[in-house]
Image (spheres, grey):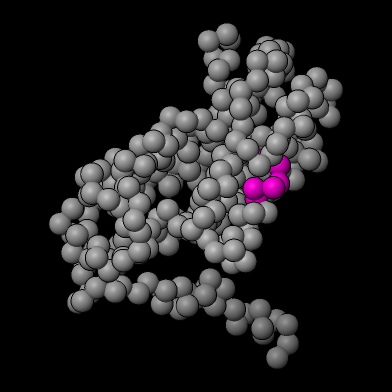
């Protein structure tokens, strides 16, 4: 078969592996219950978007290291749009009533959204570092190894600050040399620098606003997720032994990048 014949033989289904894809939804309930397919489809779609977010955020770090300011802004806007899509998918889940969810909930057994290692990777890559979140993944497992790698690597914020430093801005040394295995802590000296950049560097201030957009988008997704869980199971414990909505509420309104929020009253 020649190249032209091979190229023409490629179909939409072959390229996207549609037959394989639509075989991955396997309800466990008897019947099965009608809404279990929706539940599986939505969460598989989340995992695909998480994969894309990791792809985009890793690319963003490369662009920062290459000082590609305009392409960084483009990628930040794409990440924000994906986060908006994650929020919109909650609307679909909320079409499922508590009774409809309870009809198959027992079949989830110990499975829980808290076990999404890709979402933990996103948190670590953005800068929300917490080694305790690796506990559900056994030592030596592929998931644990991925998270350990993310934990030890600089967060997106660290890469951004290095980008500012290369452009001649005096990023505080203790911030540049911080322990990257920890979450980002506010720094007043850094905040003074960020305010100066906001007032004198329009493009860089736009980049920082785009980073705030991502931080806000993540908080928005968390809020919608909490309300969806409360609406569906109330204060019941979550699957997999989690505390459900109680734990989710504890994650609300905790920014990833506190410096970008703390300077608001001074601008």
Residue drawn at the location 27% of the way across and 50% of the way down = 237
Quarter of the N terminus within the rendering: bottom right
Residue 154 falls left or right of residue 52 = right
Quarter of the C terminus within the rendering: top right
Q: Which residues are magenta?
A: 150-155
116 lies above or below 12? above
> x, y (%) of residue 48?
50, 59
Residue drawn at the location 29% of the way across and 74% of the way down = 28
Residue 50 falls left or right of residue 1 = left
Residue drawn at the location 31% of the way across and 43% of the way down = 245
- Magenta residue check for 154: yes
Total of numbered circles in the picture? Answer: 0
Nearer to us in this view, 203 or 185: 185
264 lies above or below 98? above
> x, y (%) of residue 130?
56, 43
Residue 55 visible here: no
Residue 2 falls left or right of residue 249 = right
- Image quadrant in which you'd find residue 179: top right
């Amino acid at each position: 078969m020649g190249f032209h014949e091979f190229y023409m033989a490629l179909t939409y289904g072959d390229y996207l592996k549609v037959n394989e894809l639509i075989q991955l939804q396997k309800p466990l309930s008897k019947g099965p219950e009608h809404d279990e397919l929706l539940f599986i489809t939505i969460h598989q779609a989340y995992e695909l978007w998480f994969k894309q977010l990791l792809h985009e955020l890793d690319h963003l770090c490369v662009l920062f290291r290459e000082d590609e300011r305009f392409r960084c802004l483009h990628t930040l806007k794409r990440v924000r749009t994906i986060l908006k899509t994650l929020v919109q998918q909650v609307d679909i889940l909320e079409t499922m009533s508590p009774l409809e969810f309870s009809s198959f909930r027992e079949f989830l057994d110990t499975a829980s959204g808290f076990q999404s290692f890709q979402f933990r990777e996103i948190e670590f890559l953005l800068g929300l570092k917490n080694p305790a979140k690796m506990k559900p993944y056994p030592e030596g497992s592929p998931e644990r190894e991925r998270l350990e790698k993310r934990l030890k690597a600089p967060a997106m914020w660290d890469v951004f600050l290095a980008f500012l430093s290369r452009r001649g801005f005096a990023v505080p040394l203790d911030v540049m040399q911080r322990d990257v295995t920890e979450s980002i802590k506010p720094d007043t000296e850094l905040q003074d620098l960020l305010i100066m950049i906001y007032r004198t560097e329009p493009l860089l201030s736009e980049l920082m606003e785009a980073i705030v957009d991502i931080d806000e988008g993540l908080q928005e997704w968390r809020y919608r997720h909490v309300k969806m869980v409360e609406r569906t199971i109330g204060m019941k414990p979550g699957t997999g032994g989690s505390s459900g909505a109680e734990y989710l509420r504890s994650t609300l309104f905790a920014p990833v990048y506190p410096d970008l929020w703390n300077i608001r009253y001074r601008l």
